[in-house]
Amino acid sequence: MERRKFIKTSAMAGAGLLFSQNVFAKSFSIEEFPVVRVPKDKRHFASEAVDGAISAFKKKVKNKELAWLFENCFPNTLDTTVFYKETNGIPDTYVITGDIDAMWLRDSSAQVFPYLQFSKKDEKLHKLISGVIHKQTEFILKDPYANAFYNDINKISEWKEFDHTDMKPGIHERKWEIDSLCYPIRLAYHFWKTAGDTKPFDNNWLQGIKLTLQTFTEQQRKTGLGPYKFERTTAWATDGIPMGGYGYPTNPVGLIHSMFRPSDDATIYAFLIPSNLFAVVSLRQAAEMVSQIKNEKALAQQLNNLADEVDAAVKKYGIYNHPEHGKIYAFETNGFGSYNLMDDANCPSLLGLPYLDAVKPDDPVYLNTRKYIWSKDNPFFFKGKLAEGIGGPHIGLDMIWPMSIIMKALTTNDKSEIKWCIETLQKTHGGTGFMHESFHKDDDEKFTRVWFAWANTLFGELLWKTYNENPDLLT
């Protein structure tokens, strides 16, 4: 995400609304929650199935604040960020992140993913998600190295004069991140598995998969630095790539280079392990799809071969023997024996690997890693008077990302842990009724991004999952 200034509750423009500082006080009566969801006539998209889930949640969950938060957060993507149309009968859905008018391949996939479970009983919602897949295919074919795009194919990016890379009209930002090509595969795969609908997987989509394979292979850099480089004229060290835009030297051991993290911050060592593990599962999902839907057996074999190679390389080069925690997954490595040990709140993170089906929840290395990253040994784990959680360099010290707390709950079966996460999120929304990009460990009214749809919808996903699996935790 782009860098945002801290926003206090005195001037909140979340979801298109303006709040007064006094509209919500921490000592209010539970019957006095203000209406902060966008009015019906201002919502971008209405889903009967999603609204039905909200009604059911509000009816049965006695915790009024959680019911209020669910109604605000879960539909936030649909209410405020989607732009749906049909072109020659083909669905086309543009999805902004919230307060930034651009469509990230990662965010757009993650924002609509929780709605897949309702798409079978809501044809309009099904078509909306189909439109996201079509739109992402269009963008990937435009430039597989770009991470964010505009709906207007002729729009010139605000970064054009600062970014030294092959920028094309219609591209907002060209930061190469492995997960930008993984998330669309994840969405497409689960769309297929949930609905059995193969209409979005046309020849353009197939070309997108082939281009994804080509890009991943290029970024193994076995025969040279490849076609991508990126430099930015900026005062932010994490916004540019050193060494002529190619990054610090790496050993071509089979891992895929990712010049940026899911936070859109530059990597230190380009072998970003959580993203490489995400690539393994995505390649295998793509292989299954092209084999069964398109009968592309040779392509499927190529995809599986690359997945196997990257998986083996992670096991050989991506695991570090920590003196306190034992064998853990490194966050980054260079293949020469250097490691960056940390975790970042943005997903794919080390914490979120089971959520993406990239590792099993009982994987011993993951369990060791999980203990490491939720401890003082992780330089980006912050614990304050109000809360504890993971942040990252993108916002800076002492800023906890709600996404990390949500992901902690989504990757455990420990009821006490889930309950703690939900209670922490309930008390740290800064008096807004929405989740944010980050908040200060001692003061949740000091936060970034008043309108961040991914965090909102992801929190809704957690609450709905808990409602169905552990409703006693919502009392």
Image (cartoon, helix red, strand yellow):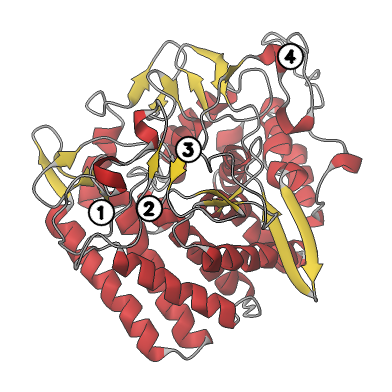
Left or right of 273 on screen, residue 72: right
User: What residue is drawn where x is 21% and y is 36%?
Assistant: 341
Q: Is residue 169 placed above or below 306 in the rendered structure?
A: above
Q: Secondary structure at mark 2?
A: helix
Q: Which residue is mark 2?
A: 354
Q: Secondary structure at mark 1?
A: loop
Decide which of tag 4 and tag 1 comes sooner along the chain: 4
Mark 4 or 3: the one toward you: 3
Between residues 103 and 66, which one lies in front from this camera angle? 103
Q: Secondary structure at mark 3?
A: loop
In space, the residues marked 2 and 1 are separated at their CA atoms by 9 Å
Mark 1 or 3: the one toward you: 3
Q: Which residue is mark 3?
A: 162
Decide which of tag 1 and tag 3 comes sooner along the chain: 3
In space, the residues marked 1 and 3 are separated at their CA atoms by 43 Å
User: Cβ–Cβ below 8 Å for labels 4 and 3?
Assistant: no
Q: Is residue 432 placed above or below 202 in the rendered structure?
A: above
In space, the residues marked 3 and 2 are separated at their CA atoms by 37 Å
Q: Which residue is mark 4?
A: 24
Badge 3 density bin: few <14, some 14–19, many ≥20, Cα 10 Å: few
| Percent coordinates x, y for residue 65 in the rendering | 69, 26
Decide which of tag 3 and tag 2 comes sooner along the chain: 3
* Quarter of the rendering containing residue 377: top left
| Percent coordinates x, y for residue 259 in the rendering | 33, 48
| Percent coordinates x, y for residue 201 in the rendering | 59, 78
User: Cβ–Cβ below 8 Å for labels 2 and 1?
Assistant: yes
The amino acid marked with disc number 4 is Phe
Q: Which residue is mark 1?
A: 363
